[in-house]
Image: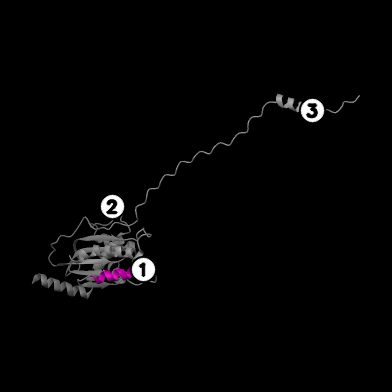
Amino acid sequence: MTDKPASKRTRRVKRELASATSPAKAPAKTPAKAKAKAPAKAKKPRAPKVPAPLVSPAHALPEARPAGTVRVLAIDPAMSNLGLVVADVDVVSGEIVGTPELRLTSTAPGKDKKTVRKSSDDLRRCRELYTAMAPLVDRVDLVCSEMPIGSQNSSAMKGVGVCTMLLATISKPLIELTPEEVKLAAVGKKTATKAEMISWAYHRHPEADWLRANGKPEGALVNANEHIADAVAVIRAGTLTDQFKLLALGFAQRAAG
């Protein structure tokens, strides 16, 4: 006798029994919640990269001048870095007497380009340059300056125009020099490097207030000294000109008379 096939009800009962007696399945693991990221630390606003003008050197020349000297202002003009040196120069030898007064005024484009016009920012930089130079012109007998030269890009040409106008405001006698004359007078070659110019000027006046790393007296000389070193060389080149010899003679005679 063959078994009759199980009815639908029988099969359903068997499934229910099997389900009831089988071990319960572990509930599916829910994915762990991602840890909340800590809020990013707010970055401190960086100070604008505008070098502070060196307007109060540790060494300033006294008002009284050594006998037989003329007081000279030497200028290495540039819109970004204006090198200025005030020194007493012997009218006969053309050598600097004592320690020269070194100054550097640096300007840079402002960062607030959304609310400040470019022309207004340029005007601010021009005022800073003039404010640094003008009081020194009043303290000296004559001025020697390296003259700005042309360039092929518009930004550099703007700097040439600014520096030329700056020099045009000088009311004292002005001895104009080319970059080649300045380098030849100092290092003896037209292709003198910035490092060579700094080395030359420093070894002539190691006691002067040169710019040093971290502002410490024992710090290494920084590259910004190139503008001051060029101004020292401007004095050297200026004293080799016939114009200086005539002017120095006139000042000496005036002082003696």
Q: Which mark is residue 30?
A: none
x and y percentages locating residue 118 in the rendered image = 35, 64
What's drawn in magenta, residue-wise?
159-169
Q: Nearer the viewer, residue 97 or 107?
A: 107
Residue 247 in the image: above or below residue 207:
below
Residue 2 in the image: above or below residue 153:
above
Q: Decide: few, some or many residues near mark 3? Use Cα within 10 Å; few <14, some 14-19, many ≥20.
A: few
Q: Secondary structure at mark 2?
A: helix
x and y percentages locating residue 223 in the rendered image = 33, 59
Q: Which residue is mark 2?
A: 215
Please name which of the two marks, 1 or 3, marks the residue nearer to the observer. Answer: 3
Q: Nearer the viewer, residue 113 or 191?
A: 113
Mark 1 and 3 residues: CB-CB less than 8 Å, in contact?
A: no
Mark 3 and 2 residues: CB-CB less than 8 Å, in contact?
A: no
The reply to whether residue 173 is visible in this rendering is yes
CA gap, disc 1 and disc 3 = 99 Å
The reply to whether residue 233 is visible in this rendering is no
x and y percentages locating residue 73 in the rendered image = 22, 66
Q: Which residue is mark 1?
A: 156
Q: Residue at x 27, y 64 (%)?
A: 127
Please name which of the two marks, 1 or 2, marks the residue nearer to the observer. Answer: 1
The residue at the far right in this view is: 1
